[in-house]
């Protein structure tokens, strides 16, 4: 029972039940608005009956040459709507957008190394751990950079795991 | 910023880079040093000066920064050979903006554009300036110029957006849309369109003018292919068709969408609305509220009964087809659609209610284990009469038992049934002991289900968590029914227990915030609120859970933090919003331009924002009320109170917005200011949230109006007091003070109006309470507001002869009657109150407000009077005489100080007694007398918890959960509650002691 549509500012006023989840970050306004202003097609919300927000995804498309890729900045689902593949639907939408409209090579995302449930879910969705980013989260926790190759990356070069972990200053994009 | 230099005036980049690097790393002194040496070489470079201004501003030297900016600006204007480039202008712009002089930055760009009329870069800069100033007309004019120079589609769209903003957010009439349409049409004819967002704006321009057929034509033409996602195109098409009343075509479009997205519930509602022609709200998300709000609201279908039947049959076949073609077991929409069709049949009066119930049972057997089941079917459950709801619950119970399930699903179904019983109110109709059994059962079920979570990651939500929320709600219900406070304590224990097992359950925390607030232990409520990490936009939507309680509490540190954090968030947003709007222009996401501006307006008119701004100033006044000089400095910064009056006047011009999300509030306090637990006890029913919201909105408006008067009234009261003494001594009031007095009268008139009284009647009522003809109950729930009014009236009448509240007959041994009112109302809060929950939860907030508001203002008025009479020294006011110690006014002031001094002394004594009593009660071990050792009454759930705790085993529960259980103790929570109470009392004590000290000084002064 999922109506997926573009996220809009007014949704920020209704997403508290989703964002109160301790693993969901509530960013400052300029963060959300930059995504809305630049990549509105990568920012979607899933609504259930009674216009309840079930979850949302925000992301972007960036990079050059074979690094041109979709990026999942955040994806989250309210506890009430978990285990219904809402995240999967949202991820598929972003992947489709990256693959078919923007012709990107891969989609990537960062996840806390300790967030086992999320890592498992991404693996189920076809993502592999591409590399580890040391102390990415507030200089404390490591991130895993996970990737999924898209149709344009015929040889799946983008997802060959890096052998060594990297530091945040080695990252190509913020 | 540092990566993008031009080199204005031939300044080498290597000289500039270190400056920006220093700025970026906040080494401003270093940056200034570099700039100084650069100025030596390029003394007339506006760019270098702009850089300097920028650094000075960042160093916190706004005046020097502004004068440097102005110097740079003068150079730009006066020197024809000066380099006028975008880098110089944008650097200057940043400095001007940070100095709150957007207008000067705009002037610079206007000047530059005048000098170089066809320079596109400068024009974009100028356009950006107008975006920052929200000058939509000038934006439009600039964009049109750019369009003429460059002929680019994006500039045309900038102009069109600017027109749309004039219509939606400015004063532009709808005729302007015709101009936008004309511009677009001409451009399309010559160059077509190339951006999907341009098409969306084109369609919205037509839609706003109700030219649906034209919009549809464009959508189905070549331009339609700009929308690459088919569903997106179909959604717009469906909406346009529906709005043009071509329901048959719209139905087909929505059908097509459902074939592509069979789980889209909103689309199904559109489909049904068009098929039955009874209208549904065809909004595609809140962004379009303004465009579509007036259209297609629910209406009655004009179709005949037979036609309706036949169309419902068509819908039924379509839904059956959808069901047949879906193999995904998670898709619920077509199943829920079957329910909706049954409901529609029922609405048209030709179907048996049993079909709807059967459909509900069917839906339950498929999806009953899901946490969202009840919110899915809520609307259907509520159309059933109570006896049918009960019957349904029995059927669901049978169904649940009859289907073999894995434990997690079985648990899910049981929870769903509990939730339905809660929603329909069927639990509450049972006798008390049966309700207690229910709670016991639920808590047992929760404890038994802990084994299901033994291998779960501690961050994952656990099956069965909702059981504790429902249990606590039912326990509160028991309190409501019986008045036995132990149920509330038990509800707290249950939730605290749940949080010790998994500390991330925000629903428990929210309930605890309210339960602790109800008990008056705001410090504990705040601790849980803090753990929710409410920040950024959540401050707007979620801080209502604690904000009103903190406002009435003595926890000023916490309150200050909340107010400051919130205002910082809002003000940051207002500062950044325009720049982000420009990003949307630049990235050609035009629909977001409109959305951003509308959203900024929505937040700017937020009722919470208004209240916070007012209360922040009032808190400042409260905290400094001990010292007249400090208070006057604050009043100065508020322009003698005019700042808040302006704020209130602005409210009159635009409707307030209410952005709080109330859905997460407990049943018993559905909106701010509503608390059913305070009685009267009524039978539980479904509360009409819409009505409550209207009530709340009206009240918020009135509160804002009233509170915005405070700073000005305090200012006027202080002046009036000193004027009164001067009048007495000089037997001649001077004109300006008369003016103050008449302004005061009109503000008091406004104040009284917010209490639904005329000033005359209000003064009469106050007089009656003064004289004991009426009790203070006559003030209803607005005691504090009335006593505040009485204090201001007292100050006003010091120079007025119109109302004689302070005449000698009304005076009590030389003092003012307002003294006895203050005394009476404060002592009433603290005397004869039992049990303690009434005292802490109900009376303390009132007492805090009485002490920190009317008493504080009155203390200031006395200070103001006594200061005039000071024989000498710097505090002596011009016009004051050297010896007035025998003046009756001064005698009254001193008597007043004496009377209130004794009152506060009595309050201090009582508070100390209560603190001592709490200490003597052995910290909570005897705190819940009723809970221990009884088979009925409160405590059954707590006993289940204690049994679980005592029998916890690692093997069954896993190491983590077993460890938590082994260390859990209800005594710890009891102690926490007691220390929370002590904290509240101690904070109040501190405030009272400072008032006591102040009054002591006053009563001794000049005597």
Image: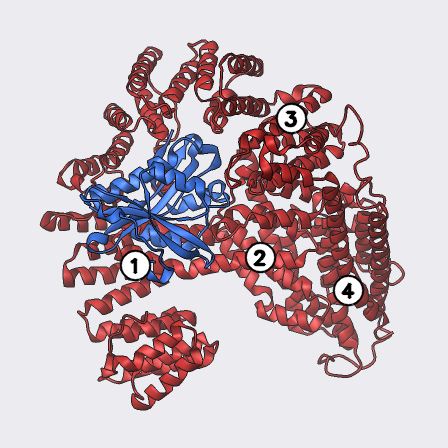
Chain colours: A blue, B red
- Read off the chain for label 4: B
Q: Residue under circle 2?
A: B563
Helix, strand or loop under label 4:
helix
Is A65 on the left-hand or right-hand side of B920? left
Asked if marks 3 and 1 fall on the same chain, the answer is no
User: Is mark 4 in CB contact (under 8 Å) with mark 3?
Assistant: no
Say which element carries label 1: loop
Report x, y in % for residue B179. 22, 50
Pointers 3 and 2 within a single chain: yes
Residue B355 sits above or below residue B907 on the image: above
Instruction: Check the image and report above or below for A85 versus B128.
Output: above
Q: Quadrant of residue B223?
A: top left
Q: Is residue A32 visible?
A: yes
Distance in Å between CA atoms under marks 3 and 1: 53 Å
CA distance separating discs 1 and 2: 39 Å
Residue placed under numbered mark 1 in the picture: A172
Query: Which residue is tagged 4?
Result: B994
| Mark in front: 4 vs 1 | 1
Of discs 1 and 2, which sits in the foreground? 1
The answer to whether marks 1 and 2 sit on the same chain is: no
Crowd around label 1: few <14 · some 14–19 · many ≥20 (10 Å): few
Q: Which residue is mark 3?
A: B444
């Amino acid at each position: 029972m999922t109506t997926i549509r573009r996220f809009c500012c007014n949704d920020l006023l209704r997403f508290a039940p989703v964002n109160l989840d301790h693993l969901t970050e509530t960013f400052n306004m300029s963060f959300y608005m930059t995504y809305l202003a630049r990549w509105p097609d990568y920012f979607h919300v899933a609504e259930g009956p009674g216009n309840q927000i079930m979850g949302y995804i925000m992301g972007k498309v960036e990079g050059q040459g074979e690094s041109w890729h979709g990026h999942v900045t955040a994806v989250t689902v309210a506890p009430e709507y978990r285990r219904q593949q809402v995240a999967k639907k949202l991820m598929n939408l972003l992947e489709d957008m990256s693959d078919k409209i923007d012709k990107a090579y891969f989609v990537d995302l960062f996840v806390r190394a300790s967030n086992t449930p999320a890592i498992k879910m991404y693996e189920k969705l076809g993502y592999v751990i591409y590399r580890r980013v040391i102390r990415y989260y507030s200089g404390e926790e490591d991130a895993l950079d996970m990737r999924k190759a898209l149709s344009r990356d015929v040889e799946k070069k983008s997802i060959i795991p890096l052998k060594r972990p990297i530091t945040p200053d080695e990252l190509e994009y913020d | 910023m540092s990566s993008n230099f031009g080199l204005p005036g031939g300044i080498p980049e290597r000289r500039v880079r270190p400056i920006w690097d220093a700025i970026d790393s906040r080494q401003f002194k270093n940056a200034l040093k570099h700039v100084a040496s650069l100025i030596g070489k390029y003394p007339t470079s506006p760019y270098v000066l702009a850089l300097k201004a920028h650094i000075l501003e960042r160093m916190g030297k706004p005046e020097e920064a502004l004068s440097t900016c102005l110097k740079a600006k003068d150079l730009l204007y006066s020197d024809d050979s000066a380099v006028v480039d975008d880098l110089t202008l944008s650097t200057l712009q940043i400095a001007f903006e940070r100095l709150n002089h957007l207008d000067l930055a705009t002037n610079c760009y206007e000047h530059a554009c005048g000098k170089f009329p066809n320079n596109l870069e400068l024009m974009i800069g100028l356009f950006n300036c107008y975006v920052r100033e929200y000058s939509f007309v000038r934006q439009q004019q600039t964009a049109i110029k750019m369009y003429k120079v460059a002929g680019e589609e994006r500039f045309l769209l900038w102009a069109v957006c600017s027109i749309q903003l004039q219509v939606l957010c400015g004063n532009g009439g709808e005729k302007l849309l015709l101009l936008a349409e004309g511009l677009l049409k001409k451009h399309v004819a010559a160059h077509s369109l190339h951006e999907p967002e341009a098409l969306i704006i084109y369609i919205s321009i037509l839609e706003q003018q109700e030219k649906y057929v034209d919009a549809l034509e464009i959508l189905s033409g070549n331009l339609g292919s700009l929308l690459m996602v088919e569903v997106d195109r179909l959604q717009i098409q469906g909406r346009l068709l529906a709005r043009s009343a071509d329901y048959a075509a719209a139905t087909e479009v929505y059908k097509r969408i459902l074939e592509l997205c069979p789980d889209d519930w909103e689309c199904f509602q559109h489909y049904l609305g068009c098929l039955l022609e009874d209208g549904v709200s065809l909004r595609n998300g809140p962004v379009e509220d303004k465009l579509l709000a007036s259209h297609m609201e629910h209406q009655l279908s004009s179709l005949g009964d037979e036609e309706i039947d036949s169309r419902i049959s068509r819908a039924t076949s379509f839904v059956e087809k959808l069901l047949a073609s879906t193999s995904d077991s998670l898709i619920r929409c077509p199943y829920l659609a079957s329910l909706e069709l049954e409901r529609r049949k029922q609405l048209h009066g030709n179907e048996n209610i049993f079909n709807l119930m059967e459909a509900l049972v069917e839906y339950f057997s498929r999806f009953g284990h899901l946490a969202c089941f009840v919110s899915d079917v809520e609307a259907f459950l509520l159309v059933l009469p109570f006896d049918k709801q009960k019957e349904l619950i029995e059927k669901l119970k049978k169904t649940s038992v009859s289907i073999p399930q894995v434990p997690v699903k079985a648990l899910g179904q049981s929870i769903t049934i509990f939730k339905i019983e809660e929603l329909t109110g069927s639990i509450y109709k049972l006798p008390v002991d049966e309700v207690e059994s229910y709670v016991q059962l639920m808590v047992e079920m929760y404890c038994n289900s802990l084994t299901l979570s033994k291998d779960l990651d501690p961050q994952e939500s656990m099956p069965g968590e909702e059981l504790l929320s429902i249990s606590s709600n039912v326990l509160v219900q028991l309190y409501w029914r019986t008045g036995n406070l132990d149920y509330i304590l038990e509800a707290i224990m249950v939730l605290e227990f749940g949080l010790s097992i998994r500390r991330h359950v925000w629903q428990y925390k929210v309930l605890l915030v309210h339960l602790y607030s109800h008990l008056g232990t705001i410090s504990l409520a705040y601790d849980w609120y803090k753990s929710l990490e409410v920040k950024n936009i959540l401050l707007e939507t979620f801080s209502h859970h604690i904000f009103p309680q903190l406002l009435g509490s003595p926890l000023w540190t916490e309150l200050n933090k909340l107010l400051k954090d919130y205002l910082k968030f809002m003000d940051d947003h207002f500062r950044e919003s325009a720049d982000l709007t420009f990003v949307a222009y630049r990235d050609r996401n035009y629909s977001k331009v409109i959305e951003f501006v509308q959203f900024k307006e929505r937040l700017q008119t937020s009722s919470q924002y208004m209240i916070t701004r007012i209360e922040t100033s009032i808190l400042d006044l409260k905290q400094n009320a001990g010292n007249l000089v400090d208070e006057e400095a604050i009043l100065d910064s508020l322009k003698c109170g005019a700042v808040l009056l302006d704020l209130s006047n602005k409210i009159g011009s635009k409707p307030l917005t209410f952005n709080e999300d109330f859905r997460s509030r407990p049943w018993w306090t559905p909106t701010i200011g509503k608390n059913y637990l305070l009685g009267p006890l009524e039978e539980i029913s479904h509360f009409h949230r819409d009505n409550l919201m209207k009530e709340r909105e009206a009240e918020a408006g009135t509160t804002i109006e009233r509170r915005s008067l405070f700073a000005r009234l305090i200012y006027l009261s202080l002046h009036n007091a000193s004027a009164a003494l001067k009048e007495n001594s000089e037997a001649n009031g001077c004109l300006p003070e008369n003016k103050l007095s008449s302004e005061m009268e009109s503000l008091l008139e406004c104040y009284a109006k917010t209490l639904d009284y005329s000033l005359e009647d209000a003064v009469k009522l106050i007089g009656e309470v003064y004289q004991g003809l009426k009790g203070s109950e006559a003030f209803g729930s607005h005691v504090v507001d009335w006593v505040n009014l009485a204090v201001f009236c007292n100050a006003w009448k010091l120079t007025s002869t119109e109302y004689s509240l302070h005449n000698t007959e009304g005076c009590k041994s030389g003092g003012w009657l307002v003294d006895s009112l203050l005394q009476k109302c404060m002592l009433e809060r603290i005397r004869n109150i039992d049990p303690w929950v009434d005292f802490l939860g109900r009376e303390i907030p009132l007492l805090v407000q009485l002490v920190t508001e009317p008493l504080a203002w009155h203390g200031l008025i006395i200070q103001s009077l006594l200061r005039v009479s000071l024989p000498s020294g710097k505090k002596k006011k011009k016009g004051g005489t050297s010896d007035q110690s025998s003046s009756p006014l001064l005698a009254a002031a001193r008597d007043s100080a004496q009377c209130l001094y004794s009152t506060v002394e009595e309050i201090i004594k009582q508070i100390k007694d209560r603190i001592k009593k709490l200490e003597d009660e052995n910290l909570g071990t005897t705190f819940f007398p009723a809970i221990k050792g009884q088979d009925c009454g409160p405590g059954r759930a707590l006993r289940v918890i204690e049994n679980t705790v005592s029998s916890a085993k690692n093997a069954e529960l896993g190491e983590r959960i077993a460890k938590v259980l082994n260390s859990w103790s209800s005594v710890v929570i009891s102690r926490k509650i007691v220390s929370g109470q002590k904290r509240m009392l101690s904070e109040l004590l501190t405030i009272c002691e400072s008032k006591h000290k102040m009054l002591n000084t006053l009563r001794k002064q000049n005597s």
